[in-house]
Amino acid sequence: MTTGATAAIAGWGITDVGKVYGRSATDLAADAVRRAAVDAGLPLSGIDGLLTSSGLRRDLGVRLQDTLGLRDLRLNTEMNAFGATAGAMVMFAAAMVTAGTATAVACVFADAPLRPSGSAGSAYAAGARPIPAGIPSYRLAAGAVTPNVLYAMAARRHMQTYGTTTEQLGAIAVAQREWAGSNPLAQHRTPLTLAEHQASRWIAEPLHLLDCCLVSNGGAAVIVTTADRARDLARPPVHVIGWGQGHPGQVMERGSEFGLRTGAAIAGPAALRMAGLGIDDVDVLQLYDCYTYTVLVTLEDYGVCEKGEGGPFVAEGHTARGGKLPCNTGGGQLSGYYLWGFTPLGEAVLQARGQAGERQVDRCDVVLVSGNGGVLEHHATLVLSPHGPTS
């Protein structure tokens, strides 16, 4: 092991996102890695580790090495924890570079589910999740087989338990749309009102259309290396000072806390503890937002507010522009773009570097990044900073 070595993100690359047609996930992934290498000021041949992740179509894997023309890699692995994958990748890459297993690891996600002739809603309809068999097939009879329906069940339980309202969920969508207005990559930049959120059609009650994330084609990548090496590259290093994972398991069993507590309650405190920090030290949040509800429950599980207080917290504007705890400053996956956990990760990198343009926050010493996978089944948390862990 390299004694005392710490890890940092040295490069960030993103392709065009949204309705990008005619490109495969492999093509998008290779493009993202090349862009990340250029961003870092690192030759492509300087990458000796590769971690790949694709969306639910699973059409991206270890053969990306050949597409990129990389030789003699010391690490090449496909990873998948759904929306928690980006965080898990960075953790693994950080462990590998600090151990000396590899010197520069590219972590990449790409997906291309959108088709010119199909709707966004149909992009993941086929083969998204296996059809339940045996006793669990009762969910099929009840129609509870899509993420929309299952997250709606989680949100409804939170509402029934704590009195959370659809207007409070709407406050999250409105706040993130305002942030997206300053993000040139965002798919939706037109201002949104709470009334418009409430008027949007139901997807699965209590979730409106505007409670649900976008569907995007695109790719994104980061390059992880040691902090010492990152200091000699082209961009300011973004130090990885804490990480943690949480996997509750069997979250929909009778007597479970489904909808009330997620893996964030495990991963968040673990990541902060590793960084030697508390939740009050966090300046900016970049939270996985497949649904508005996911943001709300993660705020509570991270300890930003007490259980049941997430609704009032967001309704008071604390996560919005000008609020005391900026959240999803690029618009997130609700209004920005949907690249699984690379959406919050990429915005965290830009904010930590001070390169977020008009949406740059004033203080960004500690950034907390979340990834949520499956239906509240997996969680990853990163703590990032422009400063090293001993600063």
Image: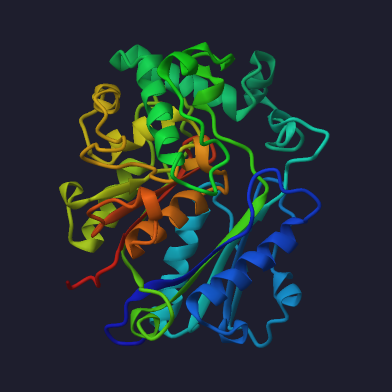
- Whether residue 254 is situated above or below residue 88 in the rendered picture: above
Q: Is residue 67 above or below residue 310?
A: below
Residue 267 appears at what percent x and percent y? 34, 49
Q: Is residue 307 left or right of residue 13?
A: left
Please determine whether, in this image, residue 70 is positioned above or below residue 282. Answer: below
Is 96 or 367 nearer to us in this picture?
A: 367
Q: Indicate the quadrant where residue 27 lies.
A: bottom right
Give the quadrant of the C terminus. bottom left
Whether residue 52 is visible here, answered yes or no, is yes
- In the picture, measured across the screen, residue 311 lies left or right of residue 208, that is left
Query: Which residue is depicted at the point 73% across and 62% down?
Result: 26
Q: Of residues 246 and 120, which is closer to you in this image?
A: 120
Left or right position of 362 against 201 = left
Q: Residue at x 81, y 52 (%)?
A: 22
Task: Say how many tags the image has.
Answer: 0
Expressed as whole percent of the image width and height from the top left, the position of residue 328 reads 39, 43
Whether residue 60 appears in this view of the structure is: no
Residue under the image location 46 percent in, 67 percent down: 92
- Res 44 quadrant in image: bottom right
Quadrant the N terminus occupies = bottom left
Residue at x-position 48% and y-position 84%:
103
Q: Quadrant of residue 53?
A: bottom right
Q: Position of residue 213 (x, y in %)?
A: 55, 34
Q: Nearer the viewer, residue 388 or 386?
A: 386
For residue 167, above or below residue 171: above
